[in-house]
Image: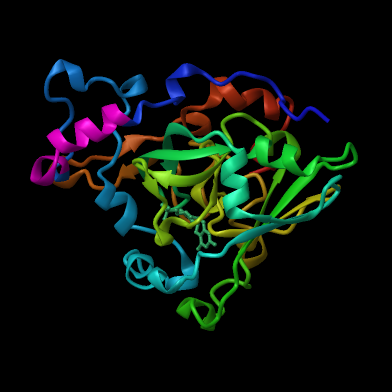
């Protein structure tokens, strides 16, 4: 089954890593910390003018509750996670179920650079230069059957390595899900790197989902299981509080969280001159993904 939903990927999402690495060198240290925008015309390479956050913001301000609920807990404790060897068990409605070794996956995939906005449901945001491959390509490896309608994901559960799973903040393991058409959309990737380096453990090594038009909690880390199914899979935050976190979790400035507004967001690392910025419909990817939700009530399906 050919999974490509529609080849709508716009060039502006694809980044040239070298430009960003150059930019980082030039923007290093205190200047980057202040989030000062452009210095000189040749730094305008970011598509749509997006400025990637410095590596330090992306890797030291995290949510990965298996390692604690503090923003700096993952960067302090995730080092304990064993990521080699790693395999992803792909099963359910697929022609070739089995354990797919991470190295074998990497050999078969094309790694691309994608500069994406990242918007957490808590109303902070970043811009992240990911490296990764399209989830559709991984699903093609396993051969999705025509009966499949959803994709379920599961994070590793390692009580010996994950100090946070002692606490019943969420039901473990962390689980997430997408509709199949969302999963095979060309913007949906499995990230394996950031700024051209292997993805750090606190960001979900060795591979994590990234769905840039949805709130960050959909982007499940350190994936060990992917299951194709015909029923909507349970998701961790929805199980914890169904009134506050829906299955879809599309970024939408018009649909507030019951306890706070989603109309604006705080860019992380903005420093002294940081100010809130308006949140964009579908996190700025409306042109690419609005068709997926044609005719749907986005207030009810939050
Ligand atoms: N995946 C797992 N397994 N555990 C988590 O706690 N947190 C989610 C998501 N994926 C989380 C997870 C949330 S709430 C967010 S905002 C993003 O990861 C944060 O990703 P980052 O730390 O790489 O920015």
User: Does the magenta segment cover residue 22?
Assistant: yes
Residue range (magenta): 18-32
5 vs 143: above or below: above
The residue sitting at 41% across, 36% down in the picture is 117
Q: In the rendered view, does 75 fall on the left or right side of 69?
A: left
Identify the image quadrant of residue 99: bottom right
Question: In the image, residue 239 lies at what x, y percent?
Answer: 67, 64
The residue sitting at 85% across, 42% down in the picture is 148
The residue sitting at 86% across, 48% down in the picture is 93
89 vs 182: above or below: below
Q: Can residue 64 be seen in this view?
A: yes
Question: In the image, residue 135 lies at what x, y percent?
Answer: 63, 39
Please tell me which residue lies in front, 193 or 85.
85
Secondary structure mostly taken by the magenta-highlighted segment of the chain:
helix
User: Does the magenta segment cover residue 29?
Assistant: yes
Which quadrant of the figure contains the N terminus?
top right
The residue sitting at 12% across, 20% down in the picture is 40
108 vs 160: above or below: above
Identify the image quadrant of residue 241: bottom right
């Amino acid at each position: 089954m050919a999974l490509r939903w529609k080849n709508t990927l716009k060039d502006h999402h694809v980044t040239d890593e070298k430009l960003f690495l150059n930019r980082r060198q030039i923007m290093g240290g205190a200047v980057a910390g202040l989030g000062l925008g452009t210095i000189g015309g040749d730094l305008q390479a970011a598509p749509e003018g997006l400025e990637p956050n410095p590596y330090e913001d992306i890797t030291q301000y995290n949510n990965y509750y298996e390692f604690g609920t503090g923003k700096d807990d993952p960067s302090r404790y995730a080092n304990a996670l064993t990521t080699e060897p790693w395999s992803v068990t792909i099963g359910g409605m697929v022609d070739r179920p089995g354990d797919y070794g991470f190295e074998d996956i990497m050999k078969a995939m094309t790694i691309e650079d994608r500069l994406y906005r990242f918007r957490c449901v808590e109303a902070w945001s970043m811009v992240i230069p990911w490296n990764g491959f399209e989830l559709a390509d991984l699903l093609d490896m396993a051969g999705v059957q025509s009966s499949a309608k959803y994709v379920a994901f599961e994070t590793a559960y390692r009580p010996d390595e994950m100090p946070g799973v002692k606490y019943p903040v969420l039901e473990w393991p962390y689980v997430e899900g997408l509709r199949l058409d969302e999963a095979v959309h060309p913007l949906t990737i499995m990230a394996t790197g950031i700024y051209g380096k292997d993805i750090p453990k606190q960001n979900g090594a060795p591979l994590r989902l990234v769905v840039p038009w949805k709130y960050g909690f959909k982007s499940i880390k350190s994936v060990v299981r992917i299951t194709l199914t015909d029923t909507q899979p349970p998701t961790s935050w929805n199980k914890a509080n169904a009134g506050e976190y829906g299955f879809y979790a599309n970024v939408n400035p018009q649909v507030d969280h019951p306890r706070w507004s989603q109309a604006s967001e705080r860019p992380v690392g903005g420093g002294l001159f940081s100010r809130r910025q308006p949140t964009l419909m579908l996190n700025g990817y409306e042109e690419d993904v609005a068709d997926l939700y044609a005719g749907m009530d986005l207030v009810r399906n939050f």
